[in-house]
Image (tube, helix red, strand yellow):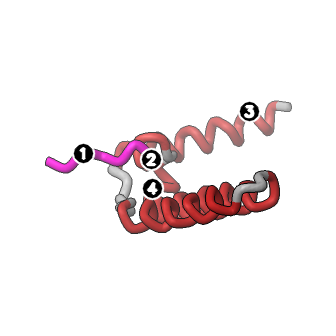
Amino acid sequence: MAMKSPLLLLLPARLKPYAKAVVATVGALATIATTYCADVPEVAAALSVLTALGVVAQRNEKPTRGELIDSVEDAAGAVRDALKR
């Protein structure tokens, strides 16, 4: 049995099908921040390589029916709370 990725455990159900895009976005933002905030270009280069490897290693996974229902219920609750204000 394959071990689940820690990222998939942290992502909400609606984002699980886009796990690779999430990894790529986080990596790109971290690379940009490193490029402009750090004076060590080697760190930015290493971060880019690690991001690419993370994207390749990350599997997109379809959420289970229960996860989808939970996600919809969470969104509905957030809308209800926003409308009460």
Q: CA distance from mark 4 to mark 3?
A: 25 Å
Question: Camera-side residue: 61 or 78?
Answer: 61
Whether pointer 3 and pointer 2 mark residues with C-beta atoms closer than 8 Å, the reply is: no
The mark nearer the N terminus, 3 or 2, is 2
Quadrant location, the C terminus:
top right
Question: Camera-side residue: 4 or 77?
Answer: 4
State the SS at label 4.
helix
Is residue 52 placed above or below 84 in the rendered structure? below
Residue 49: x and y, percent? 51, 65
Identity of the amino acid at label 1? Answer: Met
Q: CA distance from mark 1 to mark 4?
A: 15 Å
| Residue at 47 percent of width and 64 percent of height | 20
Identity of the amino acid at label 2? Answer: Leu
Image: magenta residue range: 1-7
* Residue 55 is at least partly visible in this image: yes
The mark nearer the N terminus, 4 or 2, is 2
The mark nearer the N terminus, 4 or 3, is 4
- Looking at the rendered image, the disc whose residue lies closer to the viewer, 3 or 2, is 2
- Please give the residue where the numbered disc 1 appears in the rendered image: 3
Question: Camera-side residue: 41 or 85?
Answer: 41
Residue 63 left/right relative to 77:
left
| Residue at 63 percent of width and 56 percent of height | 43
- Please give the residue where the numbered disc 4 appears in the rendered image: 16
- Please give the residue where the numbered disc 2 appears in the rendered image: 7
* Residue 18 is at least partly visible in this image: no
